Image (spheres, grey):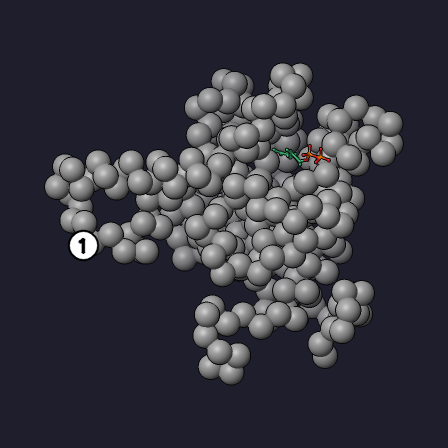
Amino acid sequence: MFSKNKNDKINQQLDMERIPNHVAIIMDGNGRWAQKRHLPRVAGHKQGMQTVKEVTIAASELGIKVLSLYAFSTENWKRPSSEVSYLMQLPVRFFSTFVPDLVKHNVKVTVMGDITRLPESTQQAVRDAMADTANCDGMILNFALNYGSRDELTQAAQKLAEDVKSGSLDITDITETTFSNYLMSAQLGEYADPDLLIRTSGEERISNFMLWQIAYSELEFVSEHWPDFNAKSLENAIIAYQGRHRRFGGLKNQ
Ligand code: FPP
């Protein structure tokens, strides 16, 4: 059954045999969610953290292998310092209450981005969460923290150039696979490339997120603000994904 319009997909069933391996989410709309309720913007981030908990458990129960969440971009430093400070405290709060649930659900935490620029307490919370979940072998919860795709690509180019200069890499060995291995997503192995990228809040932009890795991802832009997104919204996005025909540049029936 194929949808004729966006609402039809709500009536479709989720196919548990075709769950995307890697789902990436640009969690947008926290500020607008708060402003609509006459609350400070940070109230939206606080509620957004609860959504992260719900969606993480839902994704793990659906059998998703990797859930990548864009939590703080290299551009987010431009925000007022009070908001940046609040966002920096969120991982501390999140992991201090949620690591036991992550372990219970066999979820392993990984991070993409330069965390050395984050406050010491945030770095420590992230490192502890990664250590505490290191032996989990279920879903990977991959946080993008102080992450920007252009920064990632630039750093990869620098490392490649260094390796060529030192003689450990030959220019003719630079293939797409080699290049991928220099990216921050290399730790995700065979699941480094998202199958489905979701952005909430109705904005239809990529905002410097996993530019290399989303070359063939299906994109789903949903109108809900991130704090309103939930397990059902995730299922609906996956149902929409399952209605697509991924061709990877080939033909439909190949
Ligand atoms: C975008 O909404 C959201 C962010 C920049 C921060 C995302 C962070 C969370 C959802 C919490 C993350 C939790 C953990 C555990 C790290 P916005 O502020 O740009 O919203 P707006 O576009 O409506 O202003």
At horizontal 57% and vertical 32% (from top left) the residue drawn is: 72
* Vertical arrangement, residue 144 with respect to residue 180, above or below: above
Q: Which quadrant of the figure has residue 39?
A: top right
- Residue 50 % position (x, y): 72, 37
Dot 1 amino acid type = Thr
- Compared across the picture, whether 68 is left or right of 224 comes to left
- Which residue is denoted by mark 1 in the rendering? 172
SS of the residue at dot 1?
A: helix
Can you tell which quarter of the image residue 70 is in? Answer: top right
* Drawn side of residue 35 relative to residue 166, left or right: right
Residue 23 visible? The answer is yes
Count up the numbered dots. 1
From the viewer's perspective, is 246 left or right of 169?
A: right
What is the quadrant of residue 96 in the picture? top right
Q: What residue appears at the point 68 percent right and 65 percent down from the top-left corner?
A: 240
Query: Residue 206's spot in the image, x, y percent?
Result: 57, 46
Q: Please name the residue shown 20% across and 40% down the image.
A: 163
Q: Please state which of residues 94 and 226 is positioned toward the viewer in this rendering.
A: 226
Q: Nearer the viewer, residue 167 or 69?
A: 167
Q: Position of residue 68 (x, y in %)?
A: 55, 46
In the picture provided, is 56 more to the left or to the right than 35? left
